[in-house]
Amino acid sequence: MFLFSRCNICCIPFSRTLGRRLNSRCYEQGVRRYSVDLAHHINKGDTSLSNILIFHGLFGCKSNWATLAKRLTKDTGHTTVTVDTRNHGDSPHTDAMTFDLMGKDIRSLVVDKLGLSNCILIGHSMGGKVAMVTSLIEPSLVDKLIVVDSAPRQQRTSGGESWVMEYINAMLSVKFKENQSPSEMRKDVDLQLQKTMSEDAVRQFIMKNIRKNNTSFEWQLNLKALLDNHDDMIGFPEFQSTFPKPTLFVKGGCSDYILPSDHTEIFRLFPSATIETVEGAGHWVHSEKPNDFLQVVKRFLANKQE
């Protein structure tokens, strides 16, 4: 778990270049053609309760949520499913990576792979965007929505490259050497990343995406796809539809990823939403304050209001 109050690597809002209004009909027509089989891990619980699907942020993977997912199953009885989004973790690499496609992946996982007719979604940062888009496109599939420190808006940049672009380019510039031990490799890569990533916790998080190949090491992420789809990754689609079911936004008290100026759009798209703040937590709410975060989530899940 990484403890830092501000992280620039995970809150990657969705596509401005999508630009169009998405709707359920066009979404449904493309599901089977474009979806990919997502890697996932299941913690089995009570089959009478809705499954909870959990999505990581950009540059993350399902293992980021492994411990918390197990606790959530133990404490609530819900089956939890941690998911690798496309181009991350053990999921397939694809050239295209827009957020409507990622929503199709989730729909295919829920309906075709897990055989479910409904579920609960939890997403952090970029994963929160995936969860929001899926809920807005397929509202009948989602019982409840929990968005962790993420808002339905464009990523704010102060000119120049976005944080996303900076980190992708830093990873692409890493030179892996042959015949290094894992510890030697990590020390070497850490030094290379320091030029762009000053925080040790950020570098350690990024290096979780390194895997061994036949002769050396490589990035498990599909960095080319992340780079090519950068413009889509830093926007958010325009929606006229809404998700009227119970929705919880969990904000880190020390984070600025959900601002007062975001509330109007949050409540327009999610009219039943509530916003709760975990004091003393930064962007990684669930890592920095796991007990407080779980208490907020469990209280929301226990609420029977429709």
Image (cartoon, grey):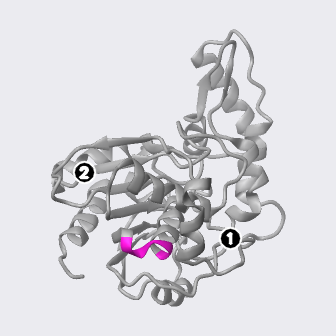
Describe residue 275's horizontal placement relative to residue 13 as left or right.
left
- Identified by mark 1, the residue type is Gly
Question: Residue 172 lies in what quarter of the image?
Answer: top right
Of all residues, the one furthest to the top in this rendering is 179
**Magenta span includes 11:** no
Q: Quadrant of the C terminus?
A: bottom left
- Position in image of residue 123 (x %, y %): 44, 61
Q: Residues within 10 Å of mark 2 (few under 14, many from 20)?
A: many
Question: Residue 297 lies in what quarter of the image?
Answer: bottom left
- Position in image of residue 109 (x %, y %): 44, 52
Give the magenta-colored segment's residue range.
Answer: 136-140
222 w.r.t. 100: above or below: above
Return the residue at label 2.
79
Callout 1: helix, strand or loop?
loop
**Magenta span includes 137:** yes
Give the residue displayed 27% in from the left and 68% down from the top: 296
Q: Nearer the viewer, residue 155 or 191?
A: 155
In this view of the protein, can residue 207 be seen by the observer? yes
The residues tagged by marks 2 and 1 sit, at their Cα atoms, a distance apart of 32 Å
